[in-house]
Amino acid sequence: MDLKLVKILREQTGAGMLECKNALEATENNLEEAIKYLEKNTKHQSQNQRVASKGLTRVVTLEDDAILFEVNAETDFASKNPYFLELLDQLSQLFISSNIKNVKEALTLNISGKSVEDHIKYVSGLMKEHIYLRRLHRIKKQKSQSYAHYMHGQGKLSVLVIFDQPCEKIEKEIAMVIAASQPSYISLDRMDKDTINYEKFLYEKDGHGFKSFDDFLNQKLLVKLSSIYDPSQTIGQILLKYEVKIIDFYRFELGQGIEDKLNCRLDIPCDGSKISVTPM
């Protein structure tokens, strides 16, 4: 057995020494065939999987298009694994340059000579833990509108905001406020009657320490939240000052919703892919 070939194969595939040794023996030390052998035979064990609630999210924009997606793994180590990070980079470029609109369509795209679904399984095998594309949402803005996006903790949280026009002075700050404060709506006048009644029901059920329904609701309204740089000003006042309007916003937080759905099949996006969004 040529140990140099084993080393090269390990560096190129990330497979274990025994796996590389077996692959080279099966292919009579043909490096290219050994790589194909590993791709074909490296399978992720689906039994006794731990809950895959770790991983990273991504937000990507290209002209008028934007994509938010989340790839989950079993451990926090995945977020620092070079194979996992490379996978996210590959998916980011592939998704934004395609016309896919949901996870089902995304999994059929071609990447590295195989489907996204099969490629994820391959990376999953290399990392020895369950990995899957949990959710994906595609957004398209008008040409006159503007995107602002913010990614926190290398992708533990991703935010996308659509403005009616460009305004670089406040775009990033508002995206950061959405990331930090988790608003559910833009403003009261953008909420329908049913939504207000639902929030009132939640307040009456458990006031969460708020003295009034108005106080309870205001902490969910983006325009009522304080500026990061000047707490004496609200986001609503800042928008008015710069004559800018928010069309919509999206907030993808890692593992959001999984803790409430541990009994669902984790290879299916159990929750809606659009979250913390103001009704249009």
Image (tube, rainbow, N blue to C red):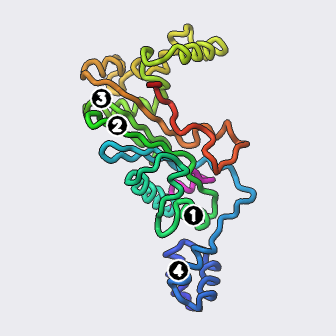
Q: Circle 2 sits on which residue?
A: 141
Q: CA distance from mark 2 to mark 3?
A: 9 Å
Q: CA distance from mark 1 to mark 3?
A: 40 Å
Q: Are marks 4 and 2 in contact (CB under 8 Å)?
A: no
Q: Is residue 11 magenta?
A: no
* Disc 1, SS: helix
How many numbered discs?
Answer: 4
105 or 11, which lies in front? 105
Q: Which residues are magenta?
A: 72-81
Q: Is residue 75 magenta?
A: yes
Q: CA distance from mark 4 to mark 2?
A: 45 Å
Q: Circle 1 sits on which residue?
A: 118
Q: Amino acid at mark 1?
A: Asp
Percent position of residue 165, x then y: 26, 30
* Disc 4, SS: helix
Q: CA distance from mark 4 to mark 3?
A: 52 Å
Q: Circle 4 sits on which residue?
A: 9
Residue 276 in the figure: left or right of residue 47:
left
Residue 211 in the figure: left or right of residue 249:
right
Q: Amino acid at mark 3?
A: Asp
Q: CA distance from mark 4 to mark 1?
A: 20 Å
Q: Which quadrant: the N terminus? A: bottom right
Q: Is residue 255 above or below residue 4?
A: above
Q: Circle 3 sits on which residue?
A: 164
Residue drawn at x 55%, y 61% as measured from the top left: 120
Percent position of residue 251, x then y: 47, 35
Q: Amino acid at mark 4?
A: Leu
Q: Are marks 4 and 1 in contact (CB under 8 Å)?
A: no
Q: Amino acid at mark 2?
A: Lys
For label 3, count other residues whose C-alpha is less than 10 Å away and answer few (under 14), some (14-19) or many (20+): some
